[in-house]
Image (cartoon, rainbow, N blue to C red):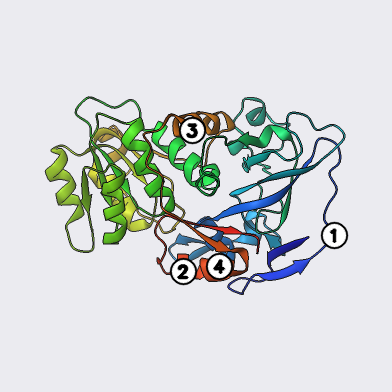
Amino acid sequence: MKSYQLTAPNQPLELVETETPVPVGGQVLLRVKACGVCHSDLHFWQGGYDLGGGKWLSIEERGLRLPLVMGHEPLGEVVALGPDAAGVGIGETRLVFPWIGCGDCPRCAEGSENDCIAMRTTGVFAPGGYADHIMVPDARYLLDIGGIDQHYAATLACAGITSYSALKKVHPLSADDRVVIIGAGGVGLTGVGIAARYLAGHELIVLDLDDEKLAHARQAGAHHTINPGRDDALARIREITGTGAGAIVDFVASGETARLGFDAVRKGGRYIAVGLFGGEFTTPTMMLPGRNLTMRGSYVGRLSEMKELLALVRAGGITPIPVRVRPMSEVTETLRDLAEGRIVGRVVVVPD
């Protein structure tokens, strides 16, 4: 089995050959056919997260251990089953739901494995999809993608579910509410395509510093686009909305975008932080009750939401994000391109 492993921060991923694992119990072994490259992988590759104010959270402090096989957007063909595995068959192509909890805590029991404090996330706390094979602990995490392009499908278990779950949290909206999406990268642009269908009837305002990404956002259904590098974004949002946005979904979540989102949401509205860019901002605490605001985070999504999203995609009406396919041997180059903002949509890597 070949895998590309992170052995040290900011270094090229190392090609390593090991014995192909054999599934036991309810495990399922897949031959990887494609794996999306996510911006979250940059934080692992760069060694941690900017907490603002000179503070840093290292990947070791978060519980990650090197070497690590990253890649939490894998899709593959079932090639071997453990003796207790049921629900899938050899030769079937399945999308891996990577947000796997411990299976024993109350959060897992209620279906909120993404809120488990002892997650076993594929590509984070368990070997991921930057490899030619991947082991999945149970067939319940394998999803049928029949009717969906395989390369696009590989983006849905992270970019898709993350944006879909975040957009569900904007409700309830009033009839006059507009929704702002900050960031038109892979996750944000996916969110625009979903929002144009899921939030039909509410105007979408999309912000990004890249005009090419804004052009794709308009094609995906954005009614207004703003480049904060040229325009006064807060003034433009207020001009379009009047009293402020009903909801703001921030797929960047830097100190600067959080400040903007907080200032641009209307009284009684919602600011939802999704991105992991890092930083901080401060505000008087009385502003929360004074403006009757809701501020919350949104972290990936539930398995049940993943199934809802796949049904929406099959039903049509959601504009797929641009997807480029590269050989897996170029995964380090892809991470560099992602860090420099050179990728529109998503890159999916496939075994050489």
What residue would you read off at disc 4? 46
Q: Nearer the viewer, residue 50 or 127?
A: 127
In three-dimensional space, the C-alpha distance between marks 2 and 1, rounded to whole angstroms, equals 31 Å
Q: Seen in the image, is 273 located left or right of residue 6?
A: left
Q: Residue at position x 82%, y 56% from top?
A: 20
- The three-letter amino acid code for the residue at tag 1 is Glu
Q: Position of residue 325 (x, y in %)?
A: 52, 59
Mark 2 Cα-neighbour bin, 10 Å: few <14, some 14–19, many ≥20? few
Q: Residue at position x 63%, y 43% from top?
A: 98
The mark found on residue 309 in the picture is: 3
Q: Earlier in the sequence, mark 1 or mark 4?
A: 1
The mark found on residue 19 in the picture is: 1
Camera-side mark, 3 or 4: 3
Mark 3 Cα-neighbour bin, 10 Å: few <14, some 14–19, many ≥20? many
What residue would you read off at disc 2? 337
Q: Earlier in the sequence, mark 4 or mark 2?
A: 4
Q: Earlier in the sequence, mark 2 or mark 1?
A: 1
- Dot 1: element: loop
> Which image quadrant for residue 2?
bottom right
